[in-house]
Image: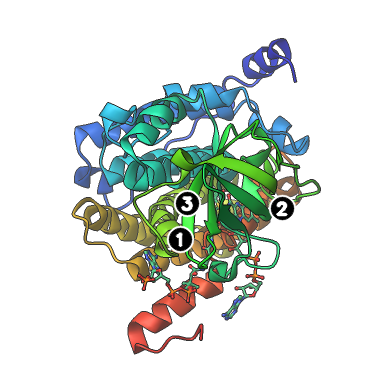
Amino acid sequence: MNSTDIADLKQKNKDRDQFEHPDFYLLDELLTEEHKLIRGSVRDWVKREISPIIEHFCQKAEFPKHIVKGLGDAGCFGPQIPSEYGGGGLDYISYGLAMQELERGDSGIRSTASVQGSLVMYPIFKFGSEEQKMKYLPKLASGEYLGCFGLTEPDHGSDPGGMITRFEDKGDHYLLNGAKMWISNAPFADVAVVWAKNEEGIVHGLIVERGMAGFTTPETHGKWSLRASATGELVFDNVKVPKENLMPGVKGLKGPLTCLNSARYGISWGAIGAAMDCYVSAVKYSKERIQFGKPIGGFQLQQKKLAEMLTEITKAQLLTWRLGVLMNENRATPAQISMAKRNNVEMALNIAREARQMHGGMGITGEYPMMRHMANLESVVTYEGTHDIHLLILGMEITGENAFV
Ligand code: TGC
Ligand code: FAD
């Protein structure tokens, strides 16, 4: 879609999004003025830049790549990364609120931002050399560069420790071979943070740049979910990676898993955004839609659905707020993060389904957001650790028994 068509679409749908969030337990009182400012500015950006166009891009299964710069300008890339590297220098609650607002717009848009901030900028910040930080972080923060994160392989998803992508030390460079699959942002990414094993079988992170000979990123087509997010493979066929592109600060699987803590935390907020969008739409529809001579919201069965949705959203808001406090204090554990990611994504999926039902036939159309959120959330419940994997992480925490071995 060219820029004139995009401008026309934005103009045509400019008043479409009138979202105000539910706050049944007055949780705004737990937020600082800065938190509310961040949330407000990302929400305004979503209303202006995403809501008018998202249905179109999802229907066409097209990544709206023109928004990448805007996401950077709106401070959505690495809000939790220190400002000396171009990040926002903000706390984890601000980061969570930004993810909530983006996913209220669309999970695919939040995906673009959480990959960039938590899975590309964060590892470079945490494990990269000073030269790597200065070279990549400001450009990633501004949206000049788009990044992706390569962990999953065709034969190793939930068990990334089995990865077969390898690099060999060739003296003045590393030689990288293998393939990654299901990689968000891959088809348009300028840089990829790639996790691969060395000759001793130890996992390291390498920064691979578009243009390196033998590196290709074929797009994955035919998705019914996250249609506005570009997904692809990373294929490495004897790619010569300069030695200075290895991130020196970590080795072993804990490298990528540490990054996932930050991204999974962001998803736990993001899912609330999707749930709130469905809930707000259902409340409005329940007041407008007349059947049997009265608004459907006057029927007890519809009230039950709405009351349960609001209860679950409120519980999830409390869970993530507390987790945000623990993240700020560097006290959040991986199992606590698993609980929030798992609970909130399932909560959002259930609400999307219930809200869809409340809209009757209209609920399956693009006039309303539920089907899009529901389909998106099927990816969200799978990536960054599936629903069952997070249950097993919790099970291990509770019992001390490792169900993975
Ligand atoms: P295991 O032996 O348990 O652990 C290996 C090493 O890692 C450490 N560790 C962690 N460190 C930091 N944070 C965590 N959450 C950690 N979990 C484990 C662990 O202490 C150990 O360290 P060390 O020093 O002893 O070596 O590993 P395992 O092979 O048994 O696997 C455990 C399991 C299943 C929990 C883990 O591998 C897992 O989480 N699997 C799910 C895979 C996953 O989440 N993939 C996500 C790919 S990226 C993605 O989906 C992006 S979507 C982006 C978007 O579009 O938004
Ligand atoms: P599998 O691991 O094959 O799992 C299949 C089923 O088996 C699941 O239900 C799972 O829960 C279950 N299972 C597996 N092991 C166990 C066990 N021990 N006990 C009980 N049940 C088990 N990856 C990246 O690296 N970067 C990305 O940017 C990225 N983006 C993605 C975008 C999308 C749209 C999608 C769909 C995926 C993305 N992924 C990405 C990959 C994602 O992280 C994996 O799909 C996910 O980790 C699951 O791996 P898998 O698909 O191979 O499923």
Quadrant of the rendered image holding ligand 2: bottom right
Look at the image and tell me whether residue 182 can be seen. yes
- Residue pointed to by mark 3: 205
Q: Amino acid at mark 1?
A: Asn
Q: Earlier in the sequence, mark 3 or mark 2?
A: 3
Q: Disc number at residue 44?
A: none
The foreground one among 392 and 127 is 127
The residue shown at (65%, 27%) is 53
Q: Earlier in the sequence, mark 2 or mark 1?
A: 1
Residue at disc 1, secondary structure: helix
Give the quadrant of residue 231.
top right
Crowding around mark 1 (Cα neighbors within 10 Å: few <14, some 14 to 19, many 20+) is: many
Q: Amino acid at mark 3?
A: Gly
The residue shown at (29%, 45%) is 93
Is residue 30 left or right of 214 when viewed as pictured?
Answer: left
Q: Disc number at residue 360?
A: 2
Is residue 22 shown above or below 20?
below
Q: Earlier in the sequence, mark 3 or mark 1?
A: 3
- Residue pointed to by mark 1: 344
Q: Is mark 2 within 8 Å of ligand 2?
A: no
Crowding around mark 3 (Cα neighbors within 10 Å: few <14, some 14 to 19, many 20+) is: many
Is residue 330 shown above or below 132?
below
Residue 75: horizontal and vertical position, in percent? Answer: 39, 28
- How is this picture coloured? rainbow
Residue at disc 2, secondary structure: helix
